[in-house]
Image (spheres, helix red, strand yellow):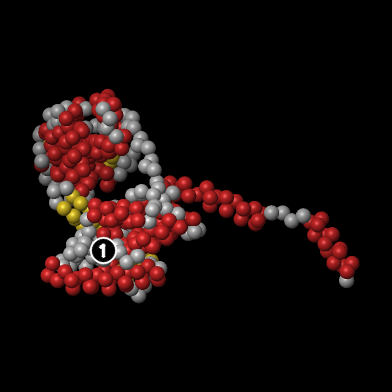
C-alpha cells in the first residue's frame, strides 16, 4: 500500500518484487520512479520536491549547464569548505562555462565533454587541472542525475587524462638532524620539530591551539586547519577528512621543545603589548594571529639554504615523517592514524616506495624462521657428545 507523505508531497510504496515506487505530481503531470530501497526512494522524492519548489523541475528541459551550475554551487555552500567552493567556481567560470555553459543540460553529450578535455590538453592546460575539471563536472552532473534533471551522466563515458604522480622528495635521518640543528634558537624551531615527529599537514600545524595539547598525557588533539580563501583571508576549517580529526601522542623531547616554545611566546606577547591578538595559537604570527602559509614557506626555504639541504616543499616534511616511521618498523596502521589518512590502503599506496628496503629485511627474517636444520648433522653431533661421555 502506498504511503502518502502529505498533500502534494508524493507517495512511496513497496512493490511485490521488493523495490519501491515513488509517485508525485508536478505541473499536472504524474511522475513515477522506481528504487531498490525505501531510503533511496524517499531521498529522490524529497530532492525532487525541493527542485520543483525552486522551479528547476519545470526549467529542466530549458536549463543550460551554466544556469544549473549556479543552482548547484548554492546547494554545495553548506557542505564544503569555503576554499573548495572558491576553487569550484574558478574551474567552472574559467574552463567549463566558456565552452559548454550555453548547452542545455539534458542535451549535453559525452563527445562534447571529451572535446573540452582534449582541447584543454592541446592548449597546454596541465593534466592535473583537466582532472579537476572532470571532477567538478562529474560531481555536478551526478547531482543533476539524482534530482532527475538528467537521466544519465554524460561524463561517465569520457576518458580523462591521468595526472602523473607528483615527485616525492624526502630527507634522510642525517638531513633531518641538519635541519633541526639549523632551526635551533629560531622562532619556528618547535614547529619544525612537531612537523617532522608527527607528519601533520601545514594547515593543521598553523591551526593548533594550546588548548589542543594535554601536557599530562602527551596528547595533541588535531581538530582544525587554517586555509587562505581568496578575498576572505585566513579561515579556520575542519581537517581535510574525517580521519584528520585525530589524537597524536608526542614524545618527551617534542613536548620539551613545546615548553621552551611557550616560554619564548610569553616573552613575545609581553614585547608586543597591545599589538598582540590572542587566538591561543601554538604557532601564530608575530602578533598572535594565524601564521601566513606563504611566510612559513619562505622561512622554510631560507632554513634549507642555511642547512645546505635539497630544495624541497614544506609538505615533503610530512612525507619525510611517514617514511622515517615506516623505516623504523612502525606499524602501517599507526602511521595511517598519525597522518590522518582514511585507511591503511591509502598510506600503503602513497608510501609504497619505502617498502623495497623493508621487504629485504623481512625476507631475511622469514628465512631465519623457516630454515630447516640438517638432522644428519644433529645426529653426528649427538654421537660425538655421547662418545665423550
Q: Residue at x 89, y 67 (%)?
A: 387
Quadrant occupied by the N terminus: top left
Residue 155 position within the rendered picture, expressed as x and y whole percent measured from the top left: 28, 32
Q: Is residue 301 above or below residue 21?
A: below
Q: Residue at x 35, y 54 (%)?
A: 304
* Label 1 sits on residue: 283
User: As drawn, is 254 to the left or to the right of 85?
Assistant: right
Residue that extends furthest to the bottom in the rendered view of this protein: 216
Q: Considering depth in this image, is 218 or 134 the residue closer to the camera?
A: 218
Q: Is residue 296 above or below residue 263?
A: above
Which quadrant of the view contains residue 271? bottom left
Q: Residues within 10 Å of mark 1 (few under 14, many from 20)?
A: many
Which quadrant of the view contains residue 269? bottom left
Q: Residue at x 20, y 26 (%)?
A: 107
Which quadrant of the view contains residue 289? bottom left
User: As drawn, is 115 to the left or to the right of 65?
Assistant: right
Residue 144 position within the rendered picture, expressed as x and y whole percent measured from the top left: 21, 37
Q: Is residue 6 visible?
A: yes
Q: Considering depth in this image, is 320 or 181 the residue closer to the camera?
A: 181
Q: Considering depth in this image, is 23 or 334 the residue closer to the camera?
A: 334
Circle 1 — which element?
loop
Q: Residue at x 60, y 51 (%)?
A: 363
Residue 315 position within the rendered picture, expressed as x and y whole percent measured from the top left: 34, 51
Amino acid at each position: 500500500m502506498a504511503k502518502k507523505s502529505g498533500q502534494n508531497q508524493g507517495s512511496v510504496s513497496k512493490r511485490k518484487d521488493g523495490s519501491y515506487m515513488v509517485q508525485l505530481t508536478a505541473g499536472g503531470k504524474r511522475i513515477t520512479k522506481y528504487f531498490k530501497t525505501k531510503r533511496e526512494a524517499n531521498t529522490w522524492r524529497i530532492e525532487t520536491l525541493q527542485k520543483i519548489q525552486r522551479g528547476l523541475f519545470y526549467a529542466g528541459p530549458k536549463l543550460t549547464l551554466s544556469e544549473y551550475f549556479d543552482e548547484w554551487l548554492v546547494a554545495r555552500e553548506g557542505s564544503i569548505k569555503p576554499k573548495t567552493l572558491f576553487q569550484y567556481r574558478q574551474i567552472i567560470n574559467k574552463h567549463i562555462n566558456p565552452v559548454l555553459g550555453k548547452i542545455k543540460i539534458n542535451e549535453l553529450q559525452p563527445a562534447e565533454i571529451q572535446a573540452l578535455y582534449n582541447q584543454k590538453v592541446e592548449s597546454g592546460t596541465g593534466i592535473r587541472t583537466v582532472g579537476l575539471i572532470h571532477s567538478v563536472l562529474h560531481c555536478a552532473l551526478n547531482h543533476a542525475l539524482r534530482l532527475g534533471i538528467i537521466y544519465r551522466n554524460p561524463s561517465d563515458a569520457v576518458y580523462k587524462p591521468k595526472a602523473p604522480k607528483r615527485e616525492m622528495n624526502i630527507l634522510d635521518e642525517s638531513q633531518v638532524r641538519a635541519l633541526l640543528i639549523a632551526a635551533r634558537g629560531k622562532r619556528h624551531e618547535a614547529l619544525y620539530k612537531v612537523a617532522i615527529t608527527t607528519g601533520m599537514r601545514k594547515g593543521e600545524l598553523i591551526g593548533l591551539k594550546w588548548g589542543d595539547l594535554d601536557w599530562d598525557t602527551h596528547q595533541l588533539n588535531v581538530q582544525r586547519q587554517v586555509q587562505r580563501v581568496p578575498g576572505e583571508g585566513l579561515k579556520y576549517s575542519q581537517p581535510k577528512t574525517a580521519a584528520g580529526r585525530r589524537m597524536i601522542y608526542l614524545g618527551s623531547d617534542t613536548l620539551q621543545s613545546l615548553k621552551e616554545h611557550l616560554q619564548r611566546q610569553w616573552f613575545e606577547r609581553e614585547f608586543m603589548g597591545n599589538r598582540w591578538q590572542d587566538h591561543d595559537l601554538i604557532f601564530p604570527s608575530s602578533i598572535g594571529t594565524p601564521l601566513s602559509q606563504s611566510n612559513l614557506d619562505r622561512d622554510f626555504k631560507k632554513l634549507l639554504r642555511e642547512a645546505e639541504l635539497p630544495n624541497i616543499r614544506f609538505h615533503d616534511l610530512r612525507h619525510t615523517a611517514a617514511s622515517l616511521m615506516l623505516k623504523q618498523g612502525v606499524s602501517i596502521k599507526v602511521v595511517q592514524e598519525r597522518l590522518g589518512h582514511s585507511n591503511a590502503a591509502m598510506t600503503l599506496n602513497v608510501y609504497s616506495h619505502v617498502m623495497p628496503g623493508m621487504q629485504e629485511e623481512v625476507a631475511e627474517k622469514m628465512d631465519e624462521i623457516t630454515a630447516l636444520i640438517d638432522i644428519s648433522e644433529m645426529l653426528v653431533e649427538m654421537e660425538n657428545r655421547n662418545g665423550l661421555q
